[in-house]
Image (tube, rainbow, N blue to C red):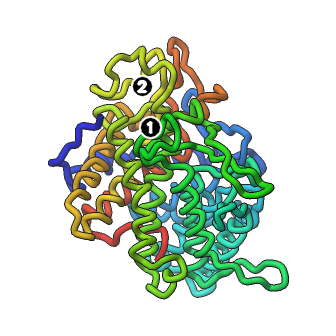
């Protein structure tokens, strides 16, 4: 399990964070030089060069969002203009894309970051440019909410690109699109001008994910332990009844794919922060503030505890907590993760996402006067310290990736295995690099006593 460093502080990580931004800048520019209109979006690296892998174009917002974060952290306006221009010219089709569950990834990472920085006065955005970002995010949130499957218990969920039967753990972070759109006063308009609340769909999706994707050690099945997660939950679309867990990118339905867990661990604390901005009256239809906050807090705590327990000492997890050959590594949880082992790959992208969740969860708990939050906060800093260190941070200017040892789809065999190695290693992913930058920015702002990083304003 993780060995938490209780002495490390955000200020103590600034040296590593500066190194990260220095390494990041030429990589963003290198990727941009390869960015030809009409080409597929970069997804992960092969021998250090970003390449595409057709599934959906779910990573494009991370490409341009990374440039925007680079500006946010360093003040280099060249990256602002890069992200601003590419968002304007390349991202509009994502706003009305009805076929995916990825609006929070693509549009909040691009349009959302620009809106946030404009609101902070970080660049000269005129009235109509700010309205442009608002309108984009209103559309995105409403379109995302159209992918809706009702459940037999009166709830429902935003279904994945697999179809109406499929609830993905990942989608908890796409709720950011609904949250911002609701904050801006948007609703989804249905047949005969039916007005559908985006906040209601946000809450119901979060409830479904908490109920079906997260386990709490209550005997739901023979493998029910506190914090285990299912990547996918399957439903009978004829009556909305839950059928069983499944996994697309993990090893099996009854094992925990660590990036799926990380999405949940990151998503719920963010939504708890969002709930805090709403008036009590808005939350009354869902049982009131206290009850709703506890509903969102429970899956966050469960997944955080599972992550701390089932991750090696340095905070970097293997790609699946139940991967079939982990036993060949012996006491792998009692030592740092080994990216170059012979049996199972690690996934640094899961660490980048989970670390942010641990920090946000810890901060939320401490603000409530719960000293247990300090443990999660320090765990998040511990993961970041490893992630920004020499083993994982790529300083090689010829490697377009920023954070090494990321895994995309191990069951499908999509990840590059270098010559002489037995498992994928030494490569990066666009979501891993983006979330490492987001993590670094969150910690940097804390160290410099700047405004806390949030997706909404």
> Are circles 2 and 1 on residues that touch, CB within 8 Å?
yes
Up-down: is 138 above or below 398? Answer: below
If you read the primary sequence from the N terminus, does the residue marked by circle 2 or circle 1 appear first? 2
Residue 352 in sight here: no
Q: Residue at x 55, y 40 (%)?
A: 429
Up-down: is 276 above or below 15? Answer: below
Front position in the image: 155 or 90: 155
Instruction: Describe residue 8's horizontal placement relative to residue 119 as left or right.
Output: left
Which residue occupies the extreme right position in the image? 192
Q: Label 1: which residue? A: 348
Quadrant that contains the N terminus? top left
Front position in the image: 264 or 83: 264
Element on which disc 2 rests: loop
Q: Position of residue 160 (x, y in %)?
A: 69, 52
Residue 240 in sight here: yes
Element on which disc 1 rests: helix
Query: Residue 192's quadrant in the figure?
Result: bottom right
Q: Position of residue 3 (x, y in %)?
A: 23, 37
Q: Label 2: which residue? A: 339
Instruction: Describe residue 236's horizontal placement relative to residue 270 as left or right.
Output: right
């Amino acid at each position: 399990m993780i060995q938490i460093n209780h002495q490390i502080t955000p200020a103590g990580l600034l040296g590593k964070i500066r190194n990260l931004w220095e390494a990041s800048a030429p990589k963003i520019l290198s990727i941009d030089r390869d960015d030809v209109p009409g080409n597929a979006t970069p997804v992960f690296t092969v021998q250090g060069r970003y390449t595409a892998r057709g599934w959906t174009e779910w990573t494009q917002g991370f490409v341009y969002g990374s440039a925007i974060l680079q500006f946010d952290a360093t003040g280099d306006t060249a990256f602002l203009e890069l992200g601003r221009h590419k968002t304007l010219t390349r991202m509009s089709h994502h706003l009305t894309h009805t076929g995916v569950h990825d609006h929070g990834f693509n549009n909040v990472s691009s349009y959302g970051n620009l809106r946030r920085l404009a609101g902070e006065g970080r660049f000269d955005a005129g009235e109509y440019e700010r309205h442009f970002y608002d309108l984009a995010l209103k559309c995105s949130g409403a379109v995302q909410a159209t992918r809706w499957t009702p459940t037999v218990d009166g709830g429902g969920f935003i279904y994945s690109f697999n179809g109406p039967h499929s609830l993905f753990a990942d989608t908890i972070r796409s709720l950011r699109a609904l949250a911002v759109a609701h904050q801006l006063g948007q609703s989804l308009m249905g047949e005969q001008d039916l007005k559908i609340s985006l906040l209601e769909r946000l809450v119901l999706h979060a409830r479904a994910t908490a109920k079906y994707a997260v386990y709490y050690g209550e005997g739901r099945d023979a493998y029910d332990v506190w914090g285990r997660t299912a990547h996918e939950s399957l439903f009978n679309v004829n009556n909305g009844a839950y059928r069983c867990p499944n996994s697309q990118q993990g090893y099996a339905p009854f094992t925990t794919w660590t990036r799926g867990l990380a999405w949940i661990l990151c998503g719920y604390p963010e939504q708890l922060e969002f709930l805090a901005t709403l008036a009590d009256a808005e939350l009354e239809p869902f049982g009131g503030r206290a009850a709703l906050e506890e509903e969102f807090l429970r899956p966050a705590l469960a997944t955080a505890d599972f992550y701390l327990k089932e991750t090696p000492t340095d905070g970097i997890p293997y790609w699946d907590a139940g991967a079939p050959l982990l036993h060949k590594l012996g006491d792998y949880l009692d030592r740092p993760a080994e990216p170059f082992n012979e049996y199972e790959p690690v996934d640094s992208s899961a660490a980048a996402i989970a670390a942010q969740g641990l920090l946000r969860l810890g901060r939320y708990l401490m603000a409530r006067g719960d000293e247990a939050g300090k443990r999660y906060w320090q765990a998040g800093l511990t993961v970041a310290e490893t992630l920004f260190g020499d083993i994982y941070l790529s300083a090689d200017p010829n490697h377009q990736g920023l954070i090494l040892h990321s895994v995309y789809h191990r069951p499908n065999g999509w990840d590059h295995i270098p010559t002489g190695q037995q498992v994928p290693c030494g490569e990066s992913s666009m979501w891993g690099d983006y979330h490492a930058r987001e993590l670094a920015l969150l910690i940097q702002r804390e160290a410099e006593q700047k405004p806390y990083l949030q997706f909404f304003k």
